[in-house]
Image (cartoon, helix red, strand yellow):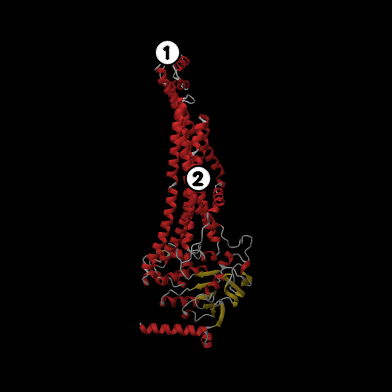
Amino acid sequence: MMGVPSVGKAEAFGPSARRLMGRLAPHWVAVTAVIVAGIISVGLSALGPRVLGRATDILFGGVIGAQMPASISREAAIAAARAGGNEQIASLLSGIDFVPGQGVDFEAMGRVLLIVLAIYLGSAVLSFLQSFVLNEVVQRTVRRLRNEVEEKLNRLPLRYFDKQPRGELLSRVTNDIDNVAQSLQQTLSQMLSSLLTVIFVLIMMFSISPLLSLVALLSIPVTMVVAGTIMSRSRVQFIEQWRSTGTLNSRVEETYSGFELVKVFGRQREVQEAFEKENDSLYQASFRAQFLSGLIMPAAFFIGNVSYAAVAVIGGLRVASGVITLGDVQAFIQYSRQFSQPVTQLASMANLLQSGVASAERVFELLDAEEESDESAKTPSLGRAEGRVVFEQASFRYEPDRPLIEDLSLTVEPGQTVAIVGPTGAGKTTLVNLIMRFYELDSGKITLDGLNIADLRRDELRENIGMVLQDTWLYKGTICENIAYGKLDATEDEIMEAARAAYVDRFVHSLPDGYDTLIDDEGGTVSAGEKQLITIARAFLADPPVLILDEATSSVDTRTELLLQQAMLALRGKRTSFVIAHRLSTITGADMILVMEQGRIVERGTHAELVAAGGAYARLYEAQFVGAVSEEVAA
């Protein structure tokens, strides 16, 4: 299995976070509304404790006033306490708004409580609207991101997919995008509210007591140092967690794609051990990431509680000295609690945002991958081709130091069937992929009807080429729908004609639902050979002037192989055909056979000519013939 590409590290957090936030720009009106609603909501919420503090002062003042005779004034009561040597009581009374002989003013308290109710109700409504709108913005942003990734995948060259394990790619497209969505959803609203709460609460705290505010603020640098230390360590673990997730996905996809082979060779134990190793790596990375991130909240709560206790003690002393009222202390204690909570939440949300940005970096790496060249400016110029294909000194390499096809020259006339044989890695599949422009030549050129295919638009080129892949692919649908995939506007008669040409009708009538039988990529009720016939019928329906069969008969039984040969003999006069096969018996009727070794054509000619020459093809044919005879004798 290929290794998983490394993921960008922490130094890319800033640019990646800005890029992620920049994706909210198309919804700037909604984002502005969210910010405004957040400011008003948090502002109202911050005003609540101060108003409640006024209710406490009314209650405390009424209790004190009820204990004094109505015959004296407030000033006289304070002076009497001071004259009696009770300076501390005098200071306390000077900070209380009371009327001697008068109890609690419940009417005034009722008005205050109604104001508080209106404040908190308005704050709650605005907070709900803020969350609702932000959720819509995030979901639309993530939907657009998924669409961009899907469109990007369609623009990436085949070379990119050759270097990416499918499980790793799927992890970026699914897990990482889901994590980005979750992180944005959970952090944006909370971080905005927490940041605004800190600002408004600080304003209210300093308006009550600058001294108590400074005491409360001492917790911030301590919390930041602790949270920053933990975050720097957990960030690396979150990146490793998502890298391990991609590796595990690749392992699962690889294993279950070839599960039958695993069972045939009895490799279940080895596969299980490899899975457990990858799963353990993911467990270790996830445990470390979650353990470290889980330390932030307890540490921040501890620091906040210490600060809270200090505020309570110093605040009580300030009330006793008459500098502030009891209601002010009550409000400040609430503000102190409100202040420590958003600071703690900011630290926690920042850690969650780190995880989201780590995933966003992986998605952005995919979006930034080099694409196929843009061809929107090219005008269609080919139309329906006749099918003359010419290679002129074509060279191609996957890696700079590993040439695969070198200086290849070849002319194929319209209607000819060209068979390509050779050992694994000889360049057979690469040669036909170059015709399709799945890869671009390093030098030389390939022409179709005299036109350089590099000058043609890929869509018009591929409209003229039908291809049956080595691994047959069927989507979930009926047999009829799968055949029609080659020509979406095909009539029923055209579909039936293609099915007959590929001998699909030979087996489809034995199925309970005939052409309406549901199948998928696993085949379902049809065999591997029958799947091959369906994909060939799909290519026949498209009726391209050039046909490529890549290992088209390598997984077909003898009876089906004969049906395919008959179909090819009937249709090869209409189209230029390139056939790659391991079974040389399928290509004996080809107009030209190319024998490739290390990217070069070492022999070319008809079957009879090559057998008579006694070269590489003759040796390969003899080996297969002897093997086939041995199998028949053994049977």
**First along the sequence among labels 2 and 1:** 1
Q: Amino acid at mark 1?
A: Ala
Q: Amino acid at mark 2?
A: Val
Image coordinates of residue 438 in percent, x first then y, are: 55, 67
**Up-down: is 361 above or below 464?**
above
Along the line of sight, the residue nearer the viewer: 77 or 100: 77
Along the line of sight, the residue nearer the viewer: 228 or 306: 306
Circle 1 Cα neighbour tier, 10 Å, few/some/many (<14 / 14–19 / ≥20): few
Q: Which mark is residue 13?
A: none
The quarter of the picture where residue 309 lies is top left
Image coordinates of residue 212 in percent, x first then y, are: 49, 32
One can see residue 115 in this view:
no
One can see residue 142 in this view:
yes
Element type at mark 2 = helix
Query: In percent of the image, x 56 and y 82: which residue is there?
Result: 604
Looking at the rendered structure, the number of numbered marks drawn on it comes to: 2
The residue that label 2 is drawn on is 225
Image coordinates of residue 442 in percent, x first then y, are: 61, 70
Quadrant where the C terminus lies? bottom left
**Up-down: is 143 above or below 266?**
above
Circle 2 Cα neighbour tier, 10 Å, few/some/many (<14 / 14–19 / ≥20): few
Alpha-carbon distance for marks 2 and 1? 57 Å
Q: Is residue 417 left or right of residue 89?
A: right
Front tag of 2 and 1: 2
**Up-down: is 219 above or below 20?**
above
The residue that label 1 is drawn on is 70
